Amino acid sequence: MLQATARRLGAFSGPFRLLLISDSLMLLSLMVGHVAVPWWVASEGGAAHLALFAASMAGASFIALPLLSPLGDRVDKKLLISGGLALMAIEGLVLAGLAQAGIYHLGWIMALELCAVVAMAAIMPASFSIVAELLPASQLTEGLGLQKSAQAIGRLMGPALGGAVLALAGTAAALWLHAVLLALAAALALRIKAATPAPGASERHWLQDLRAGLAAKWKMPLERGWTFVSFLVMIFFSPGIGMLVPLKVQSLGLSGAWLGACEAGLSAGMLLGSLGGSVWVAQRIGRFNASLWAILIEGISMLGIGLTHQPLLIVFGFAVFGACIATVQMVGHTHRMLAIPQAYRSRMTAVNMMVMQVSGVLGPGLAGVALLQIGVDWIYAVFGLGLFLVGLGYLRVPGYRTFLNLPHEQAEGLYARQHPQLFR
C-alpha cells in the first residue's frame, strides 16, 4: 500500500505535496490539542466547564466563518493558511505557558482559543478549496482523496501522540507539542505556490460576496435540503466525537491514554476509508447508498459506545465511526467540490461549515443540559438513536440520490449549468 501511495504522489506537483505534508502536520497538532485542552478543562472544571467551552467555541466559529469566508477569493490562500497557522502557534505557546505555570482560568483559555477559532475560520475554507488551484481538473478527484488521507494520518497519529504525552508528561507537555507542530505546518504552508486571486476580486464589496455565497446555497433545492438535513445530523453527531468522549473515558476511571486511543481509533477508521475503503464500498453499492448507510451506522456506533463499558469495544466503535465519516466525506465532498464553480468554492464551503457550527452549539448545549439529568452512557445512546433517525432525512432531499450517483465527469460544473443565474 505504501509503494502504491508513493507512486500516486509522484504524479502530483511539488506544491500539492507540500500542502499534504502541511495538512498532515496541522491535523496532527490540532488532534494533540483536541486531546489536551478538553482533558485539561474536564479535569479542572468538570462537565459544566467543558459544555460551556465547547458551545462557546462553536458559537464563535459560527460568527467568524461567514465573516471571513470571502478572504479565500480575495487573498493568496497560501498566506491565509500559513498566517492562520502561525497565529495558532503563538496562541498554543501562551496556552502551554499557562498550563506549565499551573494556572487554570476558563475565561483565559476561552479567550486564547477564540484566536484559534478566528484563524481556523480563515484557514479551513482556503485549505479545502486550494486543491482546485494546485491541480488540473483531471487530478482533482484523486487529489481531494489524497488530501483527506493526509489529514486522516494526522488525525490518526495526533490523538495517540497526545494521549501518550498527556499520560507520561502531563497537560503542559502536550500543549507545547501542539504549538511546535503548528509552527512547522505554518513554515511548510508558506512555501506553497498557488494561483493568485482573480483580478478585481479585492475590489468587490465584502457583503456582496457574502450574499452571493448564501444565495447560491439557499436557492438550490438540492443544496438547501442537503444542508438542512446535515444540520440536524450534526446536532447529534458533534457531541459524540467531541465533548462526550473525555466524559465517557473519565466515567470509566480510565487514563488520558485511553482518550488518545479513542481519538486514534476514530482517525484510523477515517484513514482506512480515505485510502480506498469508502471508494470500494461506493463502487459496489452506489454513492448514495454508501453515504446513507454510513450515516445510519454512525448512529448505531454511538449507541454501542454508550452502552458498553469495555474500553477496547469503545475504541472499535470509534474506528467504525471514523470509517463512516470518511465515506460520507469522500462521497459527498468530492462531488460537491466538482459541482461548485471555482470562484464560489471558498464561500460555499464556509457556509457549509457555518451551518455545522450552529449545530455544534446546539448539540453540546443539549448534551450539557441532559447531563444534569442522566449519565453519559445514556446520552450517547439517545444521541445515537437521534442520529440514526434524522439520517433517514436524506431520503427526502430533492435530487440528492440522483446527484450522488452521477459520474464525476457529469458532476463537474453541474451547479452552474443548472442554475447559471446564481453564478454570474
Image: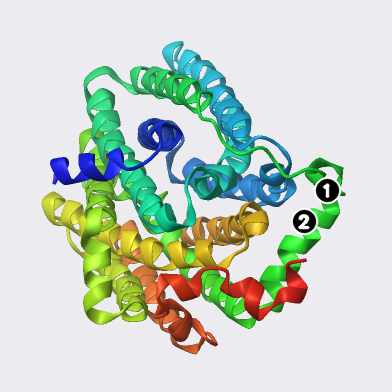
Q: Is residue 56 left or right of residue 97?
A: right
Give the CA distance from mark 2 to mark 1: 6 Å
Mark 2: give few (<14), some (14-19) or many (20+) Cα within 10 Å.
Answer: some
For badge 2, the amino acid type reads Leu
- Tell whether label 1 touches label 2 (CB within 8 Å): yes
Q: Could you tell me residue 237's position as x and y percent? A: 42, 63
- Residue nearest the viewer, comparing 26 with 254: 26
Q: Is residue 95 above or below residue 195?
A: above
Query: Residue at the spot x=26%, y=32% of the render?
Result: 163
- Residue nearest the viewer, comparing 231 with 132: 132
Q: Is residue 392 left or right of residue 82?
A: left
Query: Residue at the spot x=72%, y=47% of the render?
Result: 70
Does the rendering let one see residue 206?
yes
The image quadrant where one finds the C terminus is bottom right
Which of the 4 quarters of the picture holds residue 389? bottom left
- Residue nearest the viewer, comparing 393 with 50: 393
Q: Which residue is mark 2?
A: 210
Query: Residue at the spot x=48%, y=20% of the render?
Result: 187
Labels in figure, total: 2
Q: Which residue is mark 1?
A: 206
Q: Is residue 66 above or below residue 341?
A: above
For badge 1, the amino acid type reads Trp
Q: Could you tell me residue 405's position as x and y percent? A: 39, 80
Query: Residue at the spot x=45%, y=24% of the render?
Result: 188
Which colour style is shown?
A: rainbow
Does the rendering let one see residue 253?
no
Q: Could you tell me residue 311's position as x and y percent? A: 15, 50
Secondary structure at numbered mark 1:
helix
